[in-house]
Image (spheres, grey):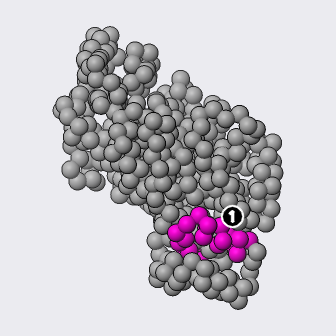
């Protein structure tokens, strides 16, 4: 790409959106050009921060005419490098952070129209003020933006009850690669007028269009929330208890999270204010949450009765039930501390997989054995959303293990895990997306016809390859 062409384009964009909305100096780019995990670093001639959908469309149109790539970016909290520009320094970063208005809340239709740059936590709080509940919830909710959540089909802690981001979107407003604005914001729950176009953009990671606003589903405000941390000697017993709870309390079951003892140990070592949940130590814990909008029937009674029966039946070793919202928050803090502790403990290889719920114990055992064969001494932290079949199977550097030696095992570790996932008809990307990190895996583990159809969609929407170049379907040998 001709540098003169790019610089001229940046000048025209600055005239369009204003100098304050067009960051040109390299020192102002730092937080935009590095991914959250620090694995990818790129360069850009400018970070553009439009304030309106019309301005987004105008910027996209200018870039399309000049043949300059655009990297859409939300809160930049992704884990696969999907919002990082290449090292070539020719791609414009288009940040949605200034499109941050809640346009409308319709409590009777149980919908909210929000712009793409709205922080997820802000939307949760806006729903609460309207006496409604927006259920999307994940560790980065204080900084991630709803446009990025939708573009990556984010999952999180409440998928078991409410579904992924895909299930929470009724409509979208999208700027297409040629600068046209597609307005599909209607808040309808039934609409059979042809293809459901919004679904093409959800989970497309900014490669087919730039999401600028969304109509989101709301639910009645939660008036009862009960949480418990349960202890088990065996993973099979933990999953057996999950099946019983689901049968007896399905309408109220919001979350069911696996926490292994090694995750607790790491959190105790590296994260201040973490407390050991029980006096005795157990190999596995489950963090369970029940919630309801009604108050006539006490969830606490249901929870305590279920746990007493399961203790009598030998499905439960020990546990603690939160006595307040604060205590429940402390239990969730332990779960999130397991994530932070892994980062602080040293290098790790993170894997976001899903398999049928019935095969989770088998998967963890088989994948652990496979990793032990290719990288002995590594520490395995398998945790996460087992209630919906999603395990974050992370392999961390072992005590006393050489960092260089551990890093050299990366490809073998990932290949061994993905082979087990493939044999179980699972997915190597449950909720994090493909981005840059998993492009090789897409070619190796996704059926050829599926990939061909994805390429056809990309060519149909974005034949010039302007939007998020190199991501998802890009060539891994393109120098990134």
- Outermost residue, bottom side: 4
Horizontal placement of 175 versus 238: left or right? right
Q: Is 422 above or below relative to 6?
A: above
User: Is residue 42 highlighted in magenta?
Assistant: yes
Instruction: Please name whichever residue, 258 or 70, is drawn nearer the observer in this view of the structure.
Output: 70
Res 329 quadrant in image: top left
Magenta extent: 41-64
Choose between 171 and 301: the one closer to the eye: 171
Residue 200 visible in the snapshot? yes
Q: Nearer the viewer, residue 192 or 431?
A: 192
Q: Which residue appears at 80% of the width and 62% of the height?
A: 463
- Which residue does the image show at 60% across and 84% down from the upper left? 15
Position of 267 compared to 433: left or right? left
Task: Place residue 303 in its image quadrant.
Answer: top left
Q: Is residue 390 above or below residue 86?
A: above
Residue 282 falls left or right of residue 391: left
Location of residue 95 in the rendering, given as x and y in whole percent from the top left corner:
54, 67
Measured from the top left, where is residue 403 in percent x and y? 45, 61
Please give the residue where the numbered disc 1 appears in the rendered image. 467
């Amino acid at each position: 790409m001709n540098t003169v062409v790019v610089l001229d384009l940046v000048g025209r964009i600055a005239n369009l959106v204003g100098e304050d909305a067009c960051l040109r100096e390299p020192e102002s780019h730092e937080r935009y050009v590095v991914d959250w995990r620090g694995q990818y670093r790129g360069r850009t001639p400018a970070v553009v921060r439009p304030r309106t959908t019309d301005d987004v469309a105008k910027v996209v149109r200018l870039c399309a005419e000049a043949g300059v790539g655009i990297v859409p970016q939300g809160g930049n909290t992704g884990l696969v490098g999907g919002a990082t520009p290449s090292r070539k320094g020719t791609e414009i970063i288009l940040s949605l952070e200034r499109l941050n208005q809640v346009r409308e809340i319709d409590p009777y239709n149980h919908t909210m129209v929000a712009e793409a740059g709205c922080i997820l936590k802000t939307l949760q709080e806006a729903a609460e003020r309207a006496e409604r509940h927006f259920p999307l919830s994940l560790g980065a909710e204080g900084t991630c933006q709803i446009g990025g959540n939708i573009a990556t089909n984010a999952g999180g802690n409440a998928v078991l009850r409410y579904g992924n981001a895909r299930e929470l979107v009724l409509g979208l407003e999208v700027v297409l690669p040629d600068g046209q604005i597609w307005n599909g914001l209607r808040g309808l729950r039934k609409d059979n007028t042809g293809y459901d176009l919004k679904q093409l953009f959800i989970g497309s990671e900014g490669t087919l269009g730039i999401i600028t606003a969304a109509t989101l589903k709301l639910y009645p405000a939660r008036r009862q929330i009960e949480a418990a941390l349960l202890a088990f000697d065996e993973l099979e017993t933990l999953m057996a208890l999950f099946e019983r709870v689901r049968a007896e309390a399905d309408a109220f079951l919001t979350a069911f999270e696996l926490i292994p003892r090694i995750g607790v140990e790491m959190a105790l070592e590296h994260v201040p204010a973490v407390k050991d949940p029980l006096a005795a130590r157990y190999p596995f814990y489950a963090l369970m949450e029940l919630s309801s909008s009604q108050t006539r029937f006490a969830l606490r009674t249901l929870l305590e009765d279920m746990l007493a029966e399961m203790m009598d039946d030998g499905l439960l070793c020990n546990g603690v039930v939160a006595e307040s919202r604060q205590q429940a928050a402390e239990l969730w803090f332990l779960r999130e501390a397991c994530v932070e502790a892994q980062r602080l403990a040293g290098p790790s290889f993170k894997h976001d997989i899903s398999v049928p719920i019935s095969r989770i114990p088998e998967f963890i055992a088989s994948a652990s054995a496979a990793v032990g064969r290719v990288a002995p001494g590594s520490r395995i932290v398998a945790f996460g959303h087992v209630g919906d079949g999603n395990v974050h199977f992370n392999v961390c550097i072992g005590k006393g293990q050489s960092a260089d030696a551990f890093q050299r095992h990366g490809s073998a570790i990932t290949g061994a895990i993905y082979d087990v996932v493939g044999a179980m008809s699972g997915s190597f990307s449950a909720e994090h997306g493909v981005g840059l990190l998993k492009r090789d895996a897409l070619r190796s583990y996704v059926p050829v016809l599926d990939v061909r159809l994805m390429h056809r969609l990309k060519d149909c929407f974005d034949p010039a390859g302007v939007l998020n170049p190199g991501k998802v379907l890009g060539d891994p040998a393109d120098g990134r």
